[in-house]
Structures are given as C-alpha cells and as structure tokens.
Amino acid sequence: MAVSTVYTAQSLHSTCSISTPTKTHLGIQQRQVLFFSKKTNRGRVRGGEIRCSGDTIVIGLAADSGCGKSTFMRRLTSVFGGAAEPPKGGNPDSNTLISDTTTVICLDDYHSLDRTGRKVEGVTALDPRANNFDLMYEQVKALKDGIAVDKPIYNHVSGLLDPPELIKPPKILVIEGLHPMYDQRVRDLLDFSIYLDISNDVKFAWKIQRDMAERGHSLESIKASIEARKPDFDAYIDPQKQYADAVIEVLPTQLIPDDNEGKVLRVKLIMKEGVKYFSPVYLFDEGSTVSWIPCGRKLTCSYPGIKFAYGPDTYYDHEVSVLEMDGQFDRLDELIYVESHLSNISTKFYGEITQQMLKHSDFPGSNNGTGLFQTIVGLKIRDLFEQITASKASATLEATKA
Ligand SMILES: Nc1ncnc2c1ncn2[C@@H]1O[C@H](COP(=O)(O)OP(=O)(O)OP(=O)(O)O)[C@@H](O)[C@H]1O
Ligand SMILES: O=C(CO)[C@H](O)[C@H](O)COP(=O)(O)O
C-alpha cells in the first residue's frame, strides 16, 4: 500500500507514516488508530497500516581488540552527560552500556561461533564466517526504525553465547567492534562512522601493557595472539577504514629519532569532506596547510615538545582534512591555549574540550592526541545528533502542515 501522509503522535516519539489514501489531520488520525504495538512500532488504522521510523541515529566505531574503543566510548558518553551502565538486572557479563542518551552495543555479540566453535572450524573472531551479519543488519535496522530487539550476548568470560538481552531503541545507538563497516547493509545504516587505526608497534605496546598487567598473559602468548590475528586483521578489519567518516590514526612519534619506547605518540585526525552534518575541525585557517609549535610562553612543553599540523589531503580517493598532534601535554589546564586556536569544534561554551579532558585526566591518552581527538569526535557526534534531530523535527512539522 502506498504511503500517503505523515503521522505524528507525541506518545510514540517517532515519525510514522500511514498507508491510507486520504490525507488526514492529526486529530482525525488519532481516532482512526485501531491498534498500535510499541514493540514492533507498527499498527493498523481504519483502511490502512501505520509504520513508524524511530529517531535513533546510528554511529559505527571500528577497531581491533585493545585499540581504545572502550576508552573512546567513555569519553563519548561523558559528552552527553550521565554515566553509562550495563543493563540493570541483566546478565553481569553483558557487553552493552546504556546511558540516558546512548546505548553502546558490542558487535562481538554477533559472533555466530563461540570460542570452541571457532577452534573446531579453525577461524578467528575476525573472520566473517564467525559472525552473523544477517542478524546484525536486521537488529541494527530494527533499532533504527524504533523497534526493540532481543540481541544475543557473547560472553567473554565463558567464551559462550548467552541468552539474549532486550535492547530498546535509544536516541544514539553506537555499534562498536570489529566489523561495523564490513557488511554494506549495516554500513548503509550508519549516520557516522569512525575507525581507530593503531599502528602495529603502538598496538603491541598497549596490548602488552594491558594483557600482561590486567589479564596475566605471558609476553610470548600475546605475541602469538597478535601474529595469529594479523592476516585476518589485514583482510577484514583494516579495509573498513576507507569507509570511515573520521579516522584516528596513532603512530610512533617523529619528535624522537628512532624512538622505540612508544610512549610519545603522533596522532592524526583524518576527517572526510562533504559528509552531511559534519564539518571538519581546522587549525587557524580552513583549507590552508599549517605547521605549529605551540610551546613557549603559553604552553609548557618538556622534551620532546609538541608539534601540530593541519591541511587538506586525500585518503582512499576521498578529499579529507587532517589535523595532527605529535608529543604530549605537560599541563592539561594549558590545553585551553590550543583549543582557542581550533575552529569548528562544536563546543557549547569556551573551553569545553579542556574541561572534558581535565574531567577524564585519568583515562589512557589524556595527555596526547588520542584523548584530544577522541574528545573532539565526541563533540562532533553530539552536534551531528542535534542537527539530525532538528532536521527531522522540521520535516515532520512541514509534513503535518501539508
Ligand atoms: N590512548 C591511549 N593511550 C595509551 N594507552 C591506551 C590508549 N587507549 C587504550 N590504551 C591501552 O589499551 C588498552 C585497551 O583499551 P580499551 O579497553 O579502551 O580498548 P578496547 O578496544 O575496548 O579493547 P577490547 O576490545 O579488547 O575490550 C587499555 O588498557 C590501555 O592500556
Ligand atoms: O577480537 C575480539 C573482539 O573483542 C575478541 O578476540 C573476540 O570477540 C573473541 O573473544 P574471546 O577472545 O573473549 O573469545
């Protein structure tokens, strides 16, 4: 049946269309509703069907394991205020984090093979054959359409697939994990996508630090696990960065010749041009090529100092703007000096980036470009969300007037 008019009902918090041939006004339509299910977001009206699409925006965050996704998610959630918690009263090993505005689901939950299954089949978790992309697509689409889903849980403690958990459509759904941009159907549902591109040397250093200190793994077993994953990482995970709207690339510093300590990092924020609702951040002058050493009277820098760069470039044949920071901050409160030279940062007040960075100074990467750029991307996502919401609201208003 053809959709002929747009229906808005305050109780539904979504935009709904009715397949009736007559153009009707809100009051009449409310009398026409015969049945409506909030679970499926569908119902019947006299002479037709009602279908609602939700207001959920979907963000994809791709990276290999141990590359800072959880840290990034904590920064993003904090931009919206409120803490993110696992679903109340649910599975204690749930991978989901829910706050007032955001729900973060981990795509490991769509592993179709559990740990034993992968061993038997001889595949890694990065291999598409170990993941259920049909279900991932159906459930992300349902949530985007405002429909709750029973999502499976992959239990990282037991290595088994646990009974599903109910996920309701949030304002912002973040799908984070190995493959948010691998399947074109899922990719097409994303309103914005991010790839955390950690160079091999840095990834190795982070993994050793975490898996040895926190998980009791030996150096040899960590090396073996990284080597075993590498071919599948190169084949299935890394290529997704070509689709990302923003890439945070983490490399060894260039400020220390032949550095092999991996403590000082050079971080690039690669921002695609022409993405709807996203205007890349710039330093001093949009579109110019800039190199800036901010150390001196207003920014304290110990060895090896700090260097920023900004300029246009191409990335996988796309036009991009790249902002780069090499080095680390000695005093986070002085970050305001750098912040005041950046534009298009989508802050709500002067110094918001600095405030966010100070608030989470204990998070990994708070003194370097990883923390700074993750915070900036968080602010850009808030801005994108506000723009999409405003544009949907005005489209609905126009449609009800028609
Ligand atoms: N910006 C950073 N600077 C330094 N170390 C970092 C940074 N981000 C993450 N790490 C290190 O990497 C480890 C993994 O980070 P995090 O838990 O955020 O990654 P993840 O991608 O969510 O991992 P997983 O998918 O395996 O759960 C941290 O314990 C920390 O040691
Ligand atoms: O790449 C991963 C994503 O986090 C994990 O290795 C994958 O999910 C398998 O988990 P586990 O090692 O706990 O069985």
Image: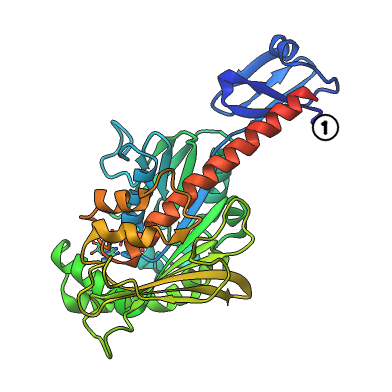
Pointer 1 local density, CA inside 10 Å: few below 14, some 14–19, many at least 20? few
400 displayed left or right of 172: right
**Quick one: which residue is furthest to the bottom in this view?**
258
Q: Secondary structure at mark 1?
A: loop
Residue in front for this viewpoint, 146 or 172: 172
Residue 21 lies, in percent from the top left, at 85, 23
Could you say which quadrant of the image residue 15 lies in?
A: top right
Residue 208 lies, in percent from the top left, at 21, 72
Residue 14 lies, in percent from the top left, at 60, 29
Can you see residue 346?
yes
Quadrant assignment for ligand 1: bottom left
**Quick one: which residue is furthest to the right in this view?**
21
Q: Is mark 1 within 8 Å of ligand 2?
A: no
Can you see residue 179?
no
Residue 7 lies, in percent from the top left, at 71, 23
Coloured how? rainbow
Compared to 354, does 263 lie above or below?
Answer: below
Give the residue number, with chain letter if any, for mark 1. Answer: 2
Amino acid type shown at disc 1 = Ala
**Quick one: which residue is furthest to the front in this view?**
297
Task: Identify the residue at horizontal 81%, vertical 30% (top origin).
Answer: 1
Task: Identify the residue at horizontal 80%, vertical 17% (top origin).
Answer: 24
Compared to 69, does 170 lie above or below?
Answer: above
Task: Identify the residue at horizontal 61%, vertical 64% (top origin).
Answer: 273
Residue in front for this viewpoint, 255 or 84: 255
398 displayed left or right of 139: right
Could you say which quadrant of the image residue 365 lies in?
A: bottom left
Task: Identify the residue at horizontal 21%, vertical 81% (top origin).
Answer: 261
381 displayed left or right of 302: right
Residue in front for this viewpoint, 125 or 376: 376
32 displayed left or right of 4: left
The C terminus appears in which quarter of the rendering? top right
